[in-house]
Image (cartoon, helix red, strand yellow):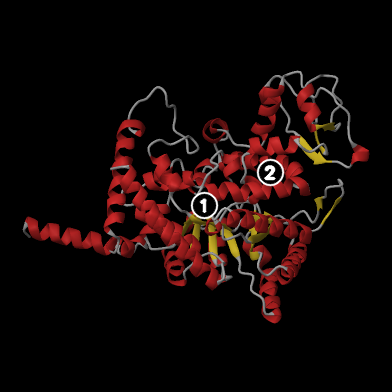
Amino acid sequence: MTLEAYMASRADLLTKERSLRRDHIYKANMSATEAKAEEIVRRLRKEEADTIWSAINEDIPHPFPGMEFLTGMPVIKMMPKGAMLHAHLDATVDVSLVLKIALEHPAIHVRSSTYLSVDEATRQLPEFRALPVSEYGTSADIASSTYVPDSWIPFKEARQACSLGIEAFDQWVIQAMTISPTEAYKTHSTVTKIWQKFTSTFLVSEGMLRYTPIWEQYIREFFLSSIRDGIMYMEPRISFWQKTMINAKGEQSATHEEWLDIFERVIQQVKSELKAQGREDEFFGARIIYTTLRFITPEELEWYLDDCIMLKQKYPHLIAGFDLVGDENVLQPLTYYLKPLLRFQEKQAELGIDIPFIFHAGETLGDGNHVDDNLFDAILLGTKRIGHGFSLAKHPLLMQMCREKGIALEICPISNEILRLTSSIPMHPLPTILNNGIPVALSPDDPAVFGNLDLSYDFYQVLVASEVTGLITLAVAARDSLEFSTLEKSEKERALAVWEKRWAAFVESICSEFK
């Protein structure tokens, strides 16, 4: 074989292999402006790799996913990202802002099982709760040995009275609600350890968030911060495990219907505000993936499934799907819940409604264990999308089924790294998923806990993880996030048309700004 013939065969083989990717057709038909923008972004990526990531720089310690990225920041930040399809609502808003909001509410109280120690390593987690006026506590120094364990102190007063100082008090609260780089890469070095820390952050924040006045402010900030990051539609997962929330009077009585009333009210408020500013195309609203925790019994699950149906009947435009959440490695597999899940589908058929499953599955390092097997059951149960699907790359038949059935994966790159499934983004199975032509929606999972407060961070990580991946790959992922959302057909078509328009403006801006 001549060298020319070999090189021709090589080029043909590369083309055939990459033709399996979903971005292949898009690349083959991209405009001259898109091609130029693609080349610019690849150049910026190489320059950054050569000068920052491949060089020894004393000013930059071990790079971690949440750190500010450099030349890639303005490009990715500007990009229209479509929909956010995998995010747990309770972990989507900057914890510093949550602290600030909580300080505005006299009902919020804090307590600890022991006084706040100078030694950070021995500090107990703070506990928060909104109390009725009749039960308000009194000011005390929570860092004093005279503090009475488990006694409630008004949050604002506890902060002001803390003898360690306001900065140390705030640090205590914020550290309890987030995972630091040190915890992610050093002290919590196994999946089990990091999940224990991860779970504890929700136990701390729920005392503030499950108070209707704060919940309403929180939802609003979730929408606004997402819009600022170029996200036009969201499907957050909300845990309905708690059957009531504390209302404005401090009573544990706000029902799930009231939760959705608040959610709907904030959607309409934000839409109205954006319309008044001539920006209505920036926000197509949000729908909720109803979740409960996978440690409950099948009998208990029946209640939640019936509750989900009731909410779907009353709020058909708000309920997007159903999921079971929690650490798959230690909690119950889908097979444990098969009977109630199958009955759930039967009831929907009888009632003429549709609540698709959108299951977490395969968020594991395992191969052939019960966690990995959740992928098989999720697909057999007809899941519309798969949350994470980290172990899917080990299953060629399941990958083929996802490609043929149009089952998108909600890939959360930074989450998978911080929760110890991969040591770095280049080691992530995402390139395998993309190379097999499976649709992907890039997602942040729990950005407030991880310190990555924009979806832009996940997009950037994907951009630098593979030489095959470029700007057009990100475009296809953004477009697919809308295509595989639960938006109604007419709204989806309108959203896609708006996204295409914003995308065209975006690539023009790259070409003009980075000549």
As drawn, is 191 to the left or to the right of 214? Answer: left
Q: Which element is circle 1 on?
A: loop
229 relative to 4, above or below: above
The percent position of residue 316, horizontal first and vertical second, equals 68, 70
Q: Which element is circle 2 on?
A: helix
Q: Going 86% across and 45% down the picture, which residue do you hit?
A: 250
The residue tagged 1 is: 443
Is the C terminus in the top left, top right, bottom left or bottom right quadrant? top left
Q: Amino acid at mark 2?
A: Phe
Which of the pair 226/415 is nearer the observer?
226
The residue tagged 2 is: 202
Query: How far apart, in angstroms, are the residues tagged by discs 1 and 2?
Result: 19 Å
Decide if residue 294 is in sight here.
no
As drawn, is 514 to the left or to the right of 476? Answer: left
The percent position of residue 334, horizontal first and vertical second, equals 63, 63
The percent position of residue 195, horizontal first and vertical second, equals 61, 43
Q: Amino acid at mark 1?
A: Ser
417 relative to 504, above or below: above
402 relative to 91, above or below: below
Q: Earlier in the sequence, mark 1 or mark 2?
A: 2
Residue 172 tag number: none
Decide if residue 176 is in sight here.
yes
Q: Going 39% across and 54% down the picture, which residue do you hit?
A: 505
Crowd class of label 1 (few under 14; some 14 to 19; many from 20; radius 10 Å): many
The percent position of residue 226, horizontal first and vertical second, equals 56, 49
